[in-house]
Image: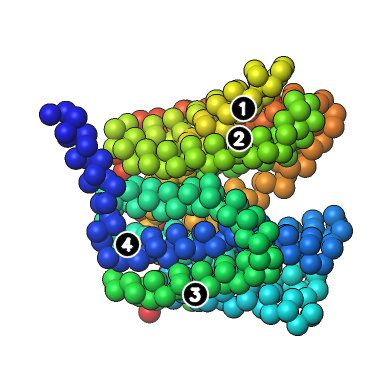
Amino acid sequence: MNAQRVRLLGKQWAWGLLRHPDFRNLWIAQTVSVVGSQLTSVALPLTAVLTLRVTPLEMGLLGAAANMPILLGGLLAGVWVDRLRRRPILIVADLGQGLLLATIPLAAFLGLLRIEMLYAIAFLVGTLKLFFDVAVTSYLPVLVRREELAEGNSKLQLSHSAADVTGPGVAGGLVQLTGAPFVLLLDALSFLVSAAFLRRIRAPEPIPPRVQRQTVWREIADGLRLLWKEPVLRAMTLATGVGSLGNSMQQTVLVLYVVRELGVTPALLGVIFAVGGAAALVGAALASPVERWQGPGPALIWGQLVIAGGGLLMAAAAGPLAVAVPLLLLAHVLRGSGMTLFSVNQITLRQAITPPQLLGRVNATRRVVVFGVVPVGALLGGALGGSIGLRPTLLAAACVVLLAFALMVFSRLRTLRQLPPMASTAPVGRSP
């Protein structure tokens, strides 16, 4: 009887919200979009390398152009997402990214492609992606009930995890067969498909309340104020920022360590990373059941502890490959599953606590914190790796991630067994 009940519950979770037409359209749109984005993450730099023969400095500038919008416009994106309906933002962002990416194979065919053009397209695509990511996280509570948020986020995260596992390999094969610019055309088409499914959503979206006109900076301050004064949001943001710093330090030196000091081959390294991606699927599938079993706060803490354990195992990997590789595999299993377990539940908590009129700004502020510390962590990891060595730097990075775990343990998250009530806010404006 118990086994039958487990199978029944598993079947119900597997379908669940996928029976909901509007959520299903959002899920399909998101899945198509993230698979296409994985193609671009491989094809765009390969276009620069194989077609334009760029220098290492030009490659660095291309990466910076793609990530700069988060630092320059992350907070402003949150303001506009709160001022406007979210679904039109998603559709426009998809269409814009598709059209921009389609210009690259066209320019390559005409012999007009230049690195400066890739800089501009990478920056503009990064800007539209920023708006899409902030808006889609803010849009889900419009489509599903509050108690369904964990399941919805879990299914959306499964798409990301599956794309992480399959996308790079598929992209590499397609580039080998057809050339990098053609793969970018496939991604452009994926954004158009995503926009088509978003247009099929029929749920009415409330018009954002009209408030007394304020400056953009005042509206940004409203989001920052809520993020700081609400204890759960504050604890999650601080812990996520600290954890992101440690993870960035770790990723900066990890490849150097395993290749140069352990002698891991590129092919074996790819297998190790793929195992971590597969484990992320498991974490995404477990996120909602663990939240129901332990509560959202403890689920977050467990996720962060598993991530930290993976970091410690990475630092412990040493000696002959027969010893080091199993440790690296286990480390990536823990890190991959812990990341998605943590991510799904922190998104759900943020959506449940934040009032709809501030959700865009809170989501955007969180992105600025998390991604803003990445370059700091990269610089710190590189500096430590050159001064104290690669393996000690991995250990230091793992200790930083453990600090994020400690911040959550000594916060209200430890006793948060169910979704808390929506936060009250100071007035952000008065109705005219």
- Disc 2/disc 1 C-alpha distance (Å): 7 Å
Q: For mark 2, does the 10 Å Cα neighbourhood hold few (<14), some (14 to 19), or many (20 or more) residues?
A: many
Q: Nearer the viewer, residue 223 or 182?
A: 182
Q: Which circle's residue, 2 or 1, is located before the other in the chain?
A: 2
Q: Are marks 3 and 4 in contact (CB under 8 Å)?
A: no
Residue 263 falls left or right of residue 349: right
- The answer, for residue 52, to whether it is visible in the render is yes
Q: Quadrant of residue 318?
A: top right
- What residue is shown with label 2? 272
- Quadrant showing the N terminus: top left
Q: Which circle's residue, 4 or 2, is located before the other in the chain?
A: 4
Q: Which mark is residue 23?
A: 4
- What residue is shown with label 1? 328
Residue 130 falls left or right of residue 212: right
Measuring 52% from the left and 32% from the top, which residue is drawn there? 333
Whole-percent x, y for residue 59 in the image: 80, 58
- Disc 1/disc 4 C-alpha distance (Å): 37 Å
Whole-percent x, y for residue 242 in the image: 60, 38
Measuring 54% from the left and 36% from the top, which residue is drawn there? 275
Mark 4 or 2, which is nearer the eye? 2
**SS of the residue at dot 1?**
helix
Number of callouts = 4
Tell me if residue 338 comes above or below residue 364 in the rendering. above
- What residue is shown with label 3? 192
Q: Which circle's residue, 3 or 4, is located before the other in the chain?
A: 4
